[in-house]
Amino acid sequence: MPRSTPPHIHLVIPCFHESRRLPPFLEALVPALQGLPLNVTIRVADDGSGEAELEQLRPVVNALREVYPAVLLPLLERPHEGKGGTILGGWRAAPEETTHFAFADADGAVSADEIRRVFGEFFASPDTDPATCLFAIRKKTPSTTIKREPSRRVIGLLYYRLVRFIMDADIYDPACGFKMVSRAFWERCGELLEEKEWALDIELLARIQFHGFPLRQIPVSWEEKSGSKIVRADIVRILKQVIAIKQRSNDWKAES
């Protein structure tokens, strides 16, 4: 069904001790998204990093807000809860006119230009089902590049395959830190989402599958940044969260 009004994207940038990596990414992202023929609001949501970090983030956000007040919203300062909880908190604080709820990692591994390109590509057709959700995927194509340490690439591929097997999901890359859900999805599932940490990606996938929402996968260029918050030991913990989500999704089927 064609859209009668322009989409309004609410993009949350969750951050935890990101005063070094976030500023250059944010300074590129805000002007890039202002230039889109869409309505976009950006919300930096801090996950209880502490006052020392906030003292560095506030001036960056405030300075950009003076130039782009319609795009960048005030810094959202939250208690420490985890990446998933921070994203959900940012989505719950979205403007009323929001039609799509997105998040992107604060490290800028998916660049400002790539985010702009993907939003433009996603909304290029006015006939796109408005309930469609978006997962960016790290996939090398003629127009995308992937820069990643070989060892982390192998670990990532093993994780993706395990997730696809556990969740029985037709998804190329379930963990790329750039995703978007529709208002229809949010209104149906927002209050049902439980994951507070890294596995929110997988819970979103499980809910999209279970409730039958359309899902579009768009390849992006991706460049690994130093300072990752995930270490190899975390993979086992995240896989346990994935298995728990699968078990809960089986319960959804039994309850329906």
Image: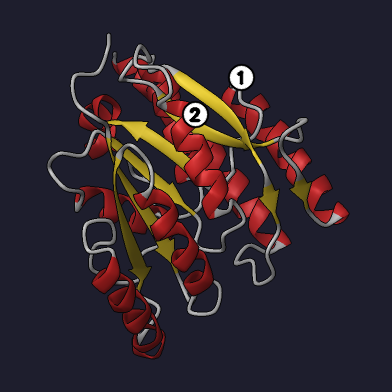
Please name whichever residue, 77 or 253, is drawn nearer the observer in this view of the structure. Answer: 77
Q: Is residue 124 above or below residue 241?
A: above
Q: Amino acid at mark 2?
A: Glu
Q: Split into 4 quadrants, where in the image is the N terminus? A: top left
Q: Quadrant of residue 255?
A: top left
Mark 1, residue position: 170
User: CB under 8 Å between callouts 2 and 1?
Assistant: no
Please name whichever residue, 144 or 157, is drawn nearer the observer in this view of the structure. Answer: 144
Tell me the residue at 28%/63% (across/down).
68
* Number of numbered markers: 2
Q: Nearer the viewer, mark 2 or mark 1?
A: 2
Secondary structure type for disc 1: loop
Label located before the other in sequence (2 or 1): 2
Q: Is residue 172 above or below residue 57?
A: above
Give how far across and how far down residue 43 sits, in percent. 30, 59
Tell me the residue at 60%/67% (across/down).
229
Residue 135 falls left or right of residue 84: right
